[in-house]
Amino acid sequence: MGLLLMVPVLAFLFLYRFGANRYALPTYLPDRVDSTQVGGKWQRDTVFHQIQPFQLLASNGRELTSQSLGRGVWVAQLFGPDETSARVARELLQVQEKFRQEPLVHLVSIVLEPGPAPVATLAQLAEQYGTIAGKWMFATGPADALKQVAQQELGRAAQPHQLLPVVGPNLPPGTLLLIDRDCRVRGVYDGTKPREIDRLLTEINVQLYEYAHSH
């Protein structure tokens, strides 16, 4: 019996010592393919799109920029005046709770229709969904800034992978995006489905593991 119990332990130790982590997240939105010469041979290298710098107003009254999100990962939601957006925001509560002690993870819900009093709207949404200051931020901005972020950047990433009808230009309701520290899209999720939220939680951990073990 003792030998039988030792088998799974030894297998785990072997995998831990000699196994390799081969699970790496994909990168979305290829911009172009460059050719570079290495060792006298030409190699093709895909250049992926990076979310361009933006400036928005956050629910804490401060300016929110892509740089202020830090050197970790962030989950982006396009928050519209629909029940799907509200449902996904409620699902984000478990993401916030899971990583509340992890400073490299942030959540951003970009409010597309803030109304005539944006600051009050953001504060109300933050209170309604129980956001933790500095961890999960509702944010908005002028029409041109929202168009850049929601349509030209995040909306562009989400649209090819959407499973739900489009509500307005490039706005798939319920979509969540995982953005890495280089402002590249590393995950696209249907936030209305529990299994997709589970996948998001797992892939955040995968990205954090990669950061912790990168040289």
Image: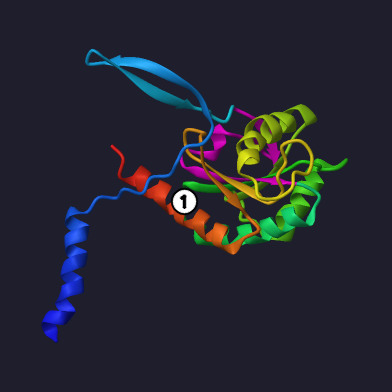
Quadrant placement of the N terminus: bottom left
Q: Which residue is drawn at 36% across and 45% down?
A: 210
Q: What residue type is labelled 1?
A: Ile
Residue 177 in which image quadrant = top right
- Residue 180 to residue 85: above or below: above
Query: Looking at the image, which is closer to me, 47 or 184?
Result: 47
Q: Position of residue 212 (x, y in %)?
A: 34, 46
Residue 156 in which image quadrant = top right
- Residue 135 to residue 158: above or below: below
Q: Point out the stretch of residues depicted in magenta.
A: 53-79
Confirm whether the magenta stretch covers residue 203.
Answer: no
Q: Residue at x 72, y 48 (%)?
A: 173
Instruction: Give the colour scheme shown.
Output: rainbow
- The residue at the far right in this view is 116
Could you tell whether 196 is left or right of 203 in the image?
right
Query: Looking at the image, which is closer to me, 6 or 147?
Result: 6
Q: Which residue is drawn at 50% across and 39% down?
A: 70
Number of numbered markers: 1
Confirm whether the magenta stretch covers residue 65.
Answer: yes
Could you tell whether 162 is left or right of 22 in the image?
right
- Residue 72 to residue 43: above or below: below
Q: Where is residue 196 in the image (x, y as percent from the top left)?
A: 56, 57
Query: Looking at the image, which is closer to me, 143 or 6?
Result: 6
Residue designated by label 1: 204
Quadrant placement of the C terminus: top left
Q: Where is residue 105 in the image (x, y as percent from the top left)?
A: 50, 48
- The residue at the far left in this view is 3
Q: Position of residue 5 (x, y in %)?
A: 18, 80
Q: Around disc 1, counting alpha carbons within 10 Å, would you say few (fewer than 14), some (14 to 19), or many (20 or more)?
A: many
Q: Residue at x 60, y 43 (%)?
A: 161
